[in-house]
Amino acid sequence: MQQCPFCGTKWSGSGPCPGCGLEPETPRDDSMFRPPEDGGKPIQEVSPEFDVEKILRWEPSPEGSNSQAEEAPEEEAAPLEDESEEEGETLKKPLKRWQKLVMAAVAVVVAAALVIRLWPQTPALPEDPAFFVQDKTLMMLPVGGEPQKVTEYTMELENYLQISPDHKGIAWEEPGVSIARLLPAAGEEIKSWEGRHVEFLRFSQDGKYLYLSMMDDEDEDSDALWRYEIASGEEEKIGPLYWDYFVENGTLAAVYDGTNLTVYDVETKDQKWTQEIDLRWMQFFDDRLYFAQFGANNSQLCCWQNGQVEVLLENIDCLYTRDDGAVYIQCYQDDSVPAAEMMKNDLGGADGQEMMQELEKMEIHSPGRTLYCFDGQELHLLGENKRLYFFPYVEQNAAICSMEYPSAEEVKGTFNLSELYDIWVEQGSIVQSQLDSLWPYEASLDYVAVKDKLFRLPEGVPQEPYTMQIEGDWVCFYAMEENILWVGKIEGENVVSKDSFVFQETMNFTMTPEGNLYYWGTNSIGPLFENGVPISAQAYLPSIQCTSDGAIYFLEGSGYAFTLHRVYQGKQEQLAENVKDCTGYTRDYATFLQYRDEESDIVDLFTYTAGKGTSLAAEEVQDLLPVVIQQDDPQFDYSMVTSYRVPLGYIDMNF
């Protein structure tokens, strides 16, 4: 029996194939393809995978795809798997349609991954310009543009600069004279408000307007909040002069002048609502204005919308705002004691009596607090008997303590009045928060919070850290007294301990979202560490700068000229030598001043762009200015424009 090489049907070999009609194969004259008789190399055999006969061999179509296949005689159908008697090979089963689709999808994904991996990434460039001083003139350098003159430079002018949200205008308050000035766009004239003292200025959220709160020595009627339309140059009075708060969402503006809170329509300037209030904080979320007000015996969180006010929370102890938009709110619980009942009058005399009379009007609250997180849409209860752990310089995320404290009955009459005497004499009164600190308690640092999500900390975390940082899934605490950096990672609902590092002196540190930890000391020249390994032995420590997207720029060396380095995702790169100063903006962009040669005091301004290297931007530059600190996003305005300021949005409702 033979097998047809085309259709696979077995037959005797005499006559045409009963399956496809193929005639029997006749001997072929292949002498022209034979290797030469002189010993030349034989032609390499073709791999069986590329056998032409196999490619042309007929195989039955899948069931239901061809009606003629169904009518074929059963004995003529080749089996899916059949071992050839002569060739000893197994015929492979044809791929099904879904298998082909899966293979095609995998091929597409692999190809896309290769393209993404090999395609050059667009450099991360800043939207705002850099600033420098050249020939006693403040200059700005747009990314990829030419230097432009701003104004005559005066000392610390960079601390007063504001860049509009559309990155086209620059406004500032002239240091020492409180005169507002505006540079609308490149090449346009500076607008000045001479003769009026600016108390506050800021751009609107869309960059169309500049709001100014100004006083006029010659015309008290001009003491007001003004709005200047940048495109038309039209100036309009919006409302009374204010000193404390101003927020705006593009449609509505809310102004607090120290007595009244007023909401205006931005376009029409119509007054939507006003109320006398003791305001402590306010913030727009869409068309809803949230604000905290202080009462005689109660502090409340309220929401205004369409002229209606709703009270959301009462008995607020403090309100703590974060750069990521989260607002944490602590509320008193019911446990409290009249202050006079808690104190023993061990002073006697007139001072003791006067202090007791003052304390009879006050209460001492227990350390127990109910903790909430507000995300702009709703309040999230984080827990009872929990308080925020306050850090002096932490602007994102939060650490949370669990509290244990004695009852009100246990603390009555347990403190001496003399313990408050020094405070009373120095300040002339006793502040509520000072009284609340007298209540004994035990606290353990148990959680970190990312907005309204709590993650449990493990045992061994420093219980009295000086500062913290959360980047991505990584958490780092710094305990200053022990000079310990503790590192953990968020996994599920917990923080898992990963590492700790000990330094011989006070540390500065930063952590990237990828988990790379960099730390250094406070001396002038010293080592810079990455995950416990020194990456520079002689870094100029005051020059170390960390960009928001995870890059480190630093100068290395001693003397007056340094080598500029960049570190990103654990890879270090030398950018330039003979450098005087630098400013890092993003992982892919920086500016630096470089000496022309080792003997010269002349420095020129250069830019570094990832993928393009360095290029000359300006010659004979005096100073390179730091990154301009932008005004708070109007959507998350935490500032209080008063002489009383507290760090990082912490607002004690009792001050």
Image (cartoon, grey):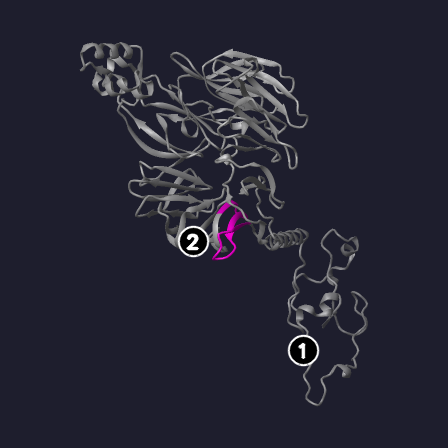
* Relative side of 315 to 122, left or right: left
In terms of secondary structure, where does tag 2 sit? Answer: strand
Secondary structure, magenta segment, majority class: strand
Q: Which three-letter amino acid code belongs to the residue tagged 2?
A: Glu
Q: Can you give x and y, in whole percent of width and height, for residue 383 in the image? A: 39, 26
Q: Nearer the viewer, mark 1 or mark 2?
A: 2
Q: Which quadrant holds the C terminus?
A: top left
Q: Residue 585 colored magenta?
A: yes
Q: Residue at x 40, y 53 (%)?
A: 559
Contact, mark 1 vs mark 2 (Cβ under 8 Å): no
Q: Can you give x and y, in whole percent of width and height, for residue 464 in the image? A: 31, 36
**Relative to 279, is 509 above or below?**
below
Foreground pick, 196 / 495: 196
* Relative side of 32 to 278, left or right: right
* Relative side of 576 to 418, left or right: right
Range of magenta residues: 582-605
**Relative to 226, is 9 above or below?**
below
* Relative side of 498 to 233, left or right: left
**Relative to 97, is 343 above or below?**
above
- Per the image, the residue denoted by label 2 is 556
Would you identify the image quadrant in which residue 25 lies?
bottom right
Q: Earlier in the sequence, mark 1 or mark 2?
A: 1
* Numbered tag placed on residue 100 in the rendering: none
Q: Can you give x and y, in whole percent of width and height, for residue 119 in the image? A: 62, 53
- Per the image, the residue denoted by label 1 is 44
Q: Residue at x 49, y 19 (%)?
A: 243
Crowd tier of the residue under label 1, counting other residues whose Cα lies within 10 Å: few below 14, some 14–19, many 20 or above: few
